[in-house]
Amino acid sequence: MNSKAFYELMDVLKNHDKIDAFIKKHTLQEILFAFKGNGLGVNAYPDSKSYEIYLGLIRKIYSTDLTQDELAEMKKYENDIKAFNALFEDYYNKNEFNEVIQVPDENKLFAFLIVFEIYVRALKDLGFNGGKNNDFYGDVDIQKNIKGKVTGIDQLSADQLIDAIDYTLQQASKVVQAFIFHGYLYENNKFNCCGIEEEIEWDDIERSIQYFHLIDIRNVLFDALEDWKFGNYKLICNGQYTDIIPKDLKSFLEEKIEIQRFESYRQTNIGSNRNENELIKQVSLTNSLAPNAFIDEWEKASYDEYIEYFSSDSLDYKVSGIELVKWLRAYAIVRYYNREFLNENIFPDNGVPNSWLYITTRDHWIKMFIKHGINRDSARFIYNKLKFKKSSVDWFDSPFIEIGENVITVPSLVSNLQDVIALTSLATKEDMNLDFKGYCYEGRILIDLRNKQIPAVSIKRKVENDEYQCDVAFLLGNDLFFCECKHTTQPVTRRKRYDFYNKKIPEDVEQTNRICDFYSSNLIHVIDEFNKNQECKLATDWKPRRIYRMVIYSCKLARKLELDRVIITDYTVFTTLLYKRLPTIFEKGKPIKQIMPPKMKGVFQGELTANKLLNFLENPWQIGFQKAATEIEDEVIPINHLFLCKKKAFKKIDNFYELGK
């Protein structure tokens, strides 16, 4: 399908004078695909005008000559958007909205933030502390919707607890965005709130618990909508039940496996093994920056995570003109003081906002930044970037919520802030330059290959005004591999995944073929580079047995791809064979057992060859294990009066993670 129509429509909707030309330019199938990707016609938000815009466009399409097949396609699309509109209308009519709207406007924000803190602290207390503080929250009716059944937090499994925490952290910021920037559920859509020392009535806090059920259902609906927009799904309506069904279960499973592999990596490499209840050992409340000194063990761990993530030996780089170690220190300061605040009183016995939330001022945070080694101009810049805005992704990216003169941070979230993920997400959103991660990543792959005595070089030549840079070229026997190395943030949303597969990969493949075509026709440059930098002794008329083209991504994939003669794989899979890493069972965060997959014995033994590499990339054990450990089941979720039926993938094995960087 022509994805260009999808991207073009986003501009057309901003300038309706271009609509007629857009309709003439594309086939009906392309237009409907673009409509679908933009969710056109689906009123996913209260007072949305999407359906009205759709009707205006659809009249123009109906005015053209359409075949019977095209009319059927139109009818199918209309039925789909009507099904979604019915589900969203059913959702916004839930009784829980009547409950939360009763909270006085001035109390809405703080009542929600306090109940959010109670909710997350209760989940953590149950999951990591054996419920020692259950006397406080035991009578609070905090519930989750699991497989269509309302389940109390005391009945959640360990996996469900972790999912509930992550899920709530991601979604709660959207509620606050709706309050502050849209005045949602406020009279006349105008946000206001009480003072930070005013007691919030417990009745208002208890009513606000309903938001978590609303968040659950909202997330289900928006996930289904994103699946439909960017995936290969069909809708079937039968009375009160709407089924959203993947047309290809293999593709459905692959998407889930990519996320599972990424989450496995995070759990083994991005700090998840820290004990939730372990008191932080203070190394030094210092004004010296890393690596000379660290505020606490968390900053040291974050430093190591940055080194790992950016594939570097140091952090001698800048982000928006500010040293990376200053960003590291800023996040460390926010995390440190929120953890300190949280540890002083886990469950306050009142409903006063500044008992539950860390509330200071802009000047306070800038002073803290300066006190701990960040210069004034950088401190101000970083603070402004970390402000929670209408366009912010969540509180990880932007932890500072400004309300008048007050700056609120949410301790349960910010005290566990993972700044590697937060900074890269913020940089993507704010268009901040992280170009250094590319050449650091290329350098890491060169080192990996050379560590295994595999000749590997980077080649750069300029011919007239054209530059040709091959990130990595390496030799296995007499076979030559040209590689482009792409350090890419994991595309975890449906939209980002769509952009990755339909925009980024084709662009990267085109770039790879341009480079490979040049060097395949000009082997003398390759010979010179290997002889000069790797002490090879290739003859001037040397020709490889075979030439292979590759793109190696840093993000996790669900299978090897091949597009226009280019092999596409990921770093973990590629280096697993280099270092002969085995599947590993973990218990309480520690590796306890390694397994040798039977089919891997021949591949892992002896010298690495091109055939072994290609065979392993075709069927890497990481992906095979994830597939074997994943099951798909049907879920029926009550929205209100209607039901949504969908597929859900889940892991059968909780304590297996792939071992590898």
Image (cartoon, grey):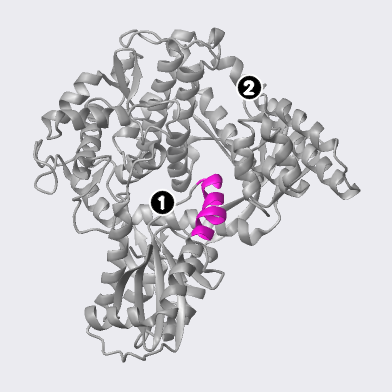
Judging by the rendered image, the residue that carries numbered circle 2 is 46
Query: Can you say whether 227 is above or below 186 in the image?
Result: below
Residue type at mark 1: give it.
Thr
Judging by the rendered image, the residue that carries numbered circle 1 is 489
Quarter of image, res 479: bottom left
| Residue 432: percent from left, percent from top | 34, 41
Residue type at mark 2: give it.
Pro
Looking at the rendering, the stretch of residues picked out in magenta corresponds to: 493-507
Query: Can you say whether 467 is above or below 408 in the image?
Result: below
Please name the predominant secondary structure of the magenta segment in the image: helix
Q: CA distance from mark 2 to mark 1?
A: 32 Å
Q: Is residue 510 visible?
A: yes
Q: Is residue 389 left or right of residue 652?
A: left
Q: Residue at x 78, y 34 (%)?
A: 58
SS label for mark 1: loop
| Residue 307: percent from left, percent from top | 24, 54
Q: Specify the quadrant that holds the C terminus.
A: bottom left
